[in-house]
Amino acid sequence: KGFVIHDRQLFVSHILPQNFDGAKFTSFTRRLKRWKFQRVPRGPEMGAYFNKYFVRDKPDLVSGMMYGIIEQSGERGDE
């Protein structure tokens, strides 16, 4: 239910410039976090990114995605 970037170099040299205004890879991953994508830390899908509202063949779910602010570690969002 997610996606994996199999070839980071190819992704950076071809996909990012064409689709993400030439953003750097770290900027791209920061955008994923803001859209609430989670990275799988271990197991057979390690390195995959997923969001429960980003599912193949279910475009109607995308409307449930929300762009948020990344909280810095150690800071509280309610202050």
Image: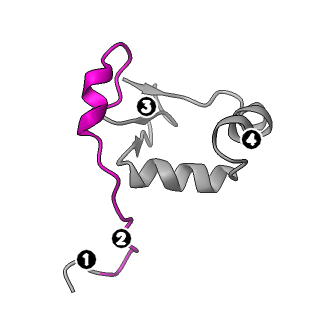
- Quadrant housing residue 49: top left
Residue 60 falls in image quadrant: top left
Secondary element at image label 3:
loop
Q: How far is mark 4 from mark 1, CA to CA?
A: 33 Å
Relative to 66, say whether 73 is above or below. Answer: below
Residue pointed to by mark 2:
71
* Image mark for residue 43: 3
Magenta region, residue range: 52-75
Give the residue drawn at x 25%, y 76%. Answer: 77
Tell whether label 2 touches label 1 (CB within 8 Å): yes
Q: Secondary structure at mark 4?
A: helix
Residues tagged 4 and 3 counted as in contact (Cβ below 8 A): no
Assess whether residue 57 is covered by the magenta stretch.
yes
Residue 34 as seen in the image, left or right of residue 11: left
Q: Which residue is mark 1?
A: 77
Q: CA distance from mark 1 to mark 2?
A: 7 Å
Task: Give the mark nearest the N terminus, 4 or 1.
Answer: 4
Name the residue tied to disc 4. 17
Marks 3 and 1 in Cβ contact (< 8 Å): no
Q: Main secondary structure of the magenta part?
A: loop
Nearest-to-viewer mark from 3 and 1: 1
Measure the C-alpha gap from mark 4 to mark 2.
27 Å
